[in-house]
Image (cartoon, rainbow, N blue to C red):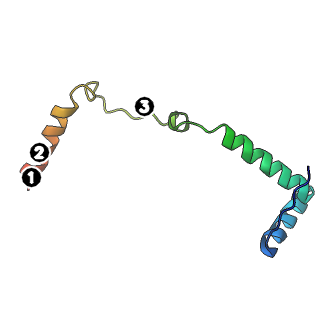
Amino acid sequence: MAISLRLDRGLEHQLARFAQSEGTSKSDLVRSLISDFVKRKSSRLTAWELGRDKFGRVGSGRGDLSTNRKALLREKLNAKSNRH
């Protein structure tokens, strides 16, 4: 299938230079870029997948944060208001 595409001169020049540096044609380069873009967009990662290697890396050392969150927040807020 043929597709026509209009590029401004600057972008066309950049495309030509990059294709030449890669040793490929502009058409092959555009095909490859579109293919990579479609693959990346079709396999979007969830927020969990994006941050998987970051989650749980630094712990507080306290195992009760989720169960005692209200009391802990109240303590923090009281301590902050007592400072002023």
Secondary structure of the residue carrying tag 3 is: loop
* Residue for badge 3: 56
Q: Position of residue 40 (x, y in %)?
A: 69, 42
Specify the quadrant of the image occupied by residue 23.
bottom right
Image-based side of 58 in relation to 69, left or right: right
Specify the quadrant of the image occupied by residue 16.
bottom right
* Residue for badge 1: 83
* Residue for badge 2: 79
Q: Position of residue 74 (x, y in %)?
A: 14, 38
Image-based side of 63 in relation to 43, left or right: left
Whole-number angstrom distance, CA of label 2 to CA of label 3: 27 Å
Residue under the image location 8 percent in, 56 percent down: 84
Q: Position of residue 75 (x, y in %)?
A: 13, 38
Could you say which is closer to the camera, residue 71 or residue 84? 71
Could you say which is closer to the camera, residue 42 or residue 59? 42
Circle 3 crowding by C-alpha within 10 Å: few under 14, some 14–19, many from 20 = few
Secondary structure of the residue carrying tag 1 is: helix
Residue under the image location 90 percent in, 62 percent down: 20
Disc 1 residue type? Answer: Arg
Specify the quadrant of the image occupied by residue 61.
top left
In the rendered view, tell whether residue 45 sits above or below residue 64. Answer: below
Quick one: label 2 or label 3, which is nearer the N terminus?
A: 3
Whole-number angstrom distance, CA of label 3 to CA of label 1: 32 Å
Could you say which is closer to the camera, residue 3 or residue 23? 3
Outermost residue to the bottom: 9
Mark 2 and 1 residues: CB-CB less than 8 Å, in contact?
yes
Disc 3 residue type? Answer: Gly
Disc 2 residue type? Answer: Ala
